[in-house]
Image (cartoon, grey):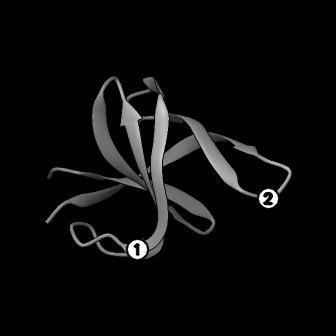
Amino acid sequence: MARKVFVEVTAKFDTEGKIIPLSLLWEDGTIYEINRVLDVRRAASLKAGGIGIRYTIRIDNKQSYLYFEEPKWFVEAKE
C-alpha cells in the first residue's frame, strides 16, 4: 500500500470558483510546477486511502494524481 504525502499546493481560483493547482511543494523542499490538469473528479485513493477531489496532473511529462481532501492536499507515494 502507498502512503499519503501531504503537500503544500499553490492554486488559482477562477471566477466560477474552480480550483486550479499550479504547483506543489514536495516533502524534501522541491517545488514541482504542474504543467497541465488533465481531469478533475471525485474519487477515492485506492493505494493510500481517503476520498476527495482527484486531479489528474502532468508534471514534466509524467502523469500523477493530486488529491484535495479538505482541507489538505496529498499525493500517493511508494513506501
| Residue 25 picture location, percent across and down | 49, 33
| Residue 58 picture location, percent across and down | 38, 36
Q: Is residue 27 above or below residue 15?
A: above
Q: Is residue 12 above or below residue 52?
A: above
Q: What kind of element bears circle 2? A: loop
Amino acid on which the number 2 mark rests in the picture: Gly
Separation of marks 2 and 1 at Cα, in angstroms: 19 Å
Q: Nearer the viewer, residue 70 or 13?
A: 13
Q: Is residue 23 above or below residue 2?
A: above
Q: Is 23 on the left-hand or right-hand side of 58?
A: right
Amino acid on which the number 1 mark rests in the picture: Ala
Q: What kind of element bears circle 1? A: strand
| Residue 6 picture location, percent across and down | 45, 52
Q: Nearer the viewer, residue 43 or 10?
A: 43
Tell me the residue at 19%/60% (across/down): 2
Query: Could you tell which of marks 2 and 1 lies nearer the N-terminus?
Result: 2
Q: Is residue 71 above or below residue 25?
A: below
* Residue 43, label in figure: 1
Mark 1: few/some/many CA within 10 Å (<14, 14-19, 20+): few
In which quarter of the view is residue 43 placed?
bottom left
| Residue 34 picture location, percent across and down | 48, 32
* Residue 72, label in figure: none
Q: Is 79 on the left-hand or right-hand side of 68?
A: left
Q: Nearer the viewer, residue 62 or 69?
A: 62
Q: Is 39 on the left-hand or right-hand side of 64?
A: right
Tell me the residue at 82%/58% (across/down): 16
Residue picked out by circle 2: 17
Count the marks: how many? 2
Look at the image and tell me in which quarter the N terminus lies.
bottom left
Mark 2: few/some/many CA within 10 Å (<14, 14-19, 20+): few
Tell me the residue at 32%/69% (across/down): 45
